[in-house]
Amino acid sequence: MIIILKKSATKQQAEELLAIIAEHGLKPLYMPGSERTVLGALGDERVLAKLSLEAYPFVDRVLPILSPYKRASRELQTHDTVVRVKGVAIGPGHFTVIAGPCAVESEAQILESARLVKAAGGHMLRGGAYKPRTSPYSFQGLEDEGLRYLAAASKETGLPVVTEVTDPHDIPKMVEHADMLQVGARNMQNFRLLKELGRAGKPVLLKRGMSATYTDLLMSAEYILSEGNADVVLCERGIRTFETGTRNTLDLNAVPYLKERTHLPVIVDPSHGTGLRDLVLPMSKAAAAAGADGLIVEMHPQPDHALSDGQQSLFPEQFAKLMEQVGRVAALEGRSLK
Ligand code: PEP
Ligand code: MN
């Protein structure tokens, strides 16, 4: 429920109403604006109906929130959210590029990757320390050692880092070493993990599950938001279809569809979305043209020797070219890579 107060309503009156909402076991939201104050009440619809909030003289209108994802919805917040990761903005006006290898493989490899990302103008470093692999016999990541190498590469280059968290128990150490926590496609509906991330105090990069609908993705974001963490970035990373030519089908419909319905930033992963490095540049340009807020791209100093996802990882010079070309497309959409 959205409660729009009259222009003349005082802060004290708003607080009175927020207390009533909380007393009934509902989650109160306070959203002061330059024109007027808007309150939110989230929870059991039957309890909400009984409150008769319209009856208060300082209430102008009470509107239902029709979307199942309340906090993520533009019905509750019309303006775009800007998520800040240690000084790097993800949101309108910017086109934010996160790049790095699929996995942290050694201290030298992640440090060299970070230097290459920085030199080409990338904004953030990626790299998995805990890798969710299809086969238990594939490289599983360097785990805690990888986290330390990531933090060292971040310290040297100044690039904030994002890394994947696969288990709620790992969150405390992840928070110590990373600036943003990634939820991978395979964990998009790990609701315990999402709830814990809602209380972790770090921005979250939430990747779309490979067979998840847009509403599934937004409901997963809602789990994080409803625990009090407003810094959620959504990521389209390709879905499973009947097509076998590419690893996944990058669904760029997701970008304008999601951006119309949610105020959260939406970025695109053309590496997992295609599985083929030669498709990464054209699909990155397409993502920028579709209105995405940025990209997450796999780049490796030596893709031929990568321990995971080498075939979709860009060579450093391809990444530098991508930054230049995508910058031109993003500029047409009013976004800057600077
Ligand atoms: C990754 O970013 O390396 C990764 C495993 O991505 P996804 O969860 O989208 O498959
Ligand atoms: Mn990968």
Image (cartoon, rainbow, N blue to C red):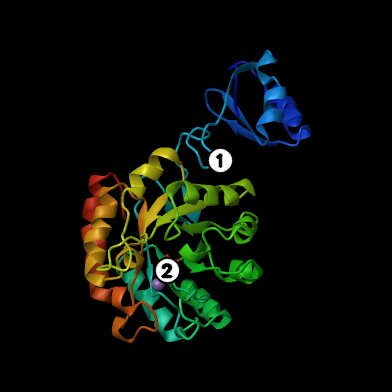
User: Quadrant of residue 334 in the image?
Assistant: top left
Q: Is mark 2 within 8 Å of ligand 1?
A: no
Which residue is the site of mark 1?
71
Type of amino acid at the residue the image marks with label 1: Arg
x and y, in percent, of residue 71 in the image: 56, 40
Left or right of 125? Residue 242 is left
Depth check, mark 2 against mark 1: the one in front is: 1
- Secondary structure of the residue carrying numbered label 1: loop
Residue at 68%, 25% in the rendered image: 14
Asked whether the viewer can see residue 122, the reply is: yes
Residue at 44%, 77% in the rendered image: 103
x and y, in percent, of residue 194 in the image: 59, 57
**Disc on res. 125:** 2
Left or right of 145? Residue 209 is left
Mark 1 residue crowding within 10 angstroms, few (<14) / some (14–19) / many (20+): many
Left or right of 98? Residue 165 is right
Q: Nearer the viewer, residue 159 or 169?
A: 169
Image region (quadrant) for ligand 1: bottom left
Position of 167 relative to 293 (above/below): below
Q: Indicate which disc, 2 or 1, sits on the residue closer to the N terminus.
A: 1
x and y, in percent, of residue 299 in the image: 33, 73
User: Quadrant of residue 118 in the image?
Assistant: bottom left
Position of 228 relative to 208 (above/below): above
Separation of marks 2 and 1 at Cα, in angstroms = 29 Å
Type of amino acid at the residue the image marks with label 2: Leu
x and y, in percent, of residue 129 in the image: 51, 76
- Secondary structure of the residue carrying numbered label 2: strand
- Image quadrant in which the C terminus is located: bottom left
Asked whether the viewer can see residue 184, the reply is: no
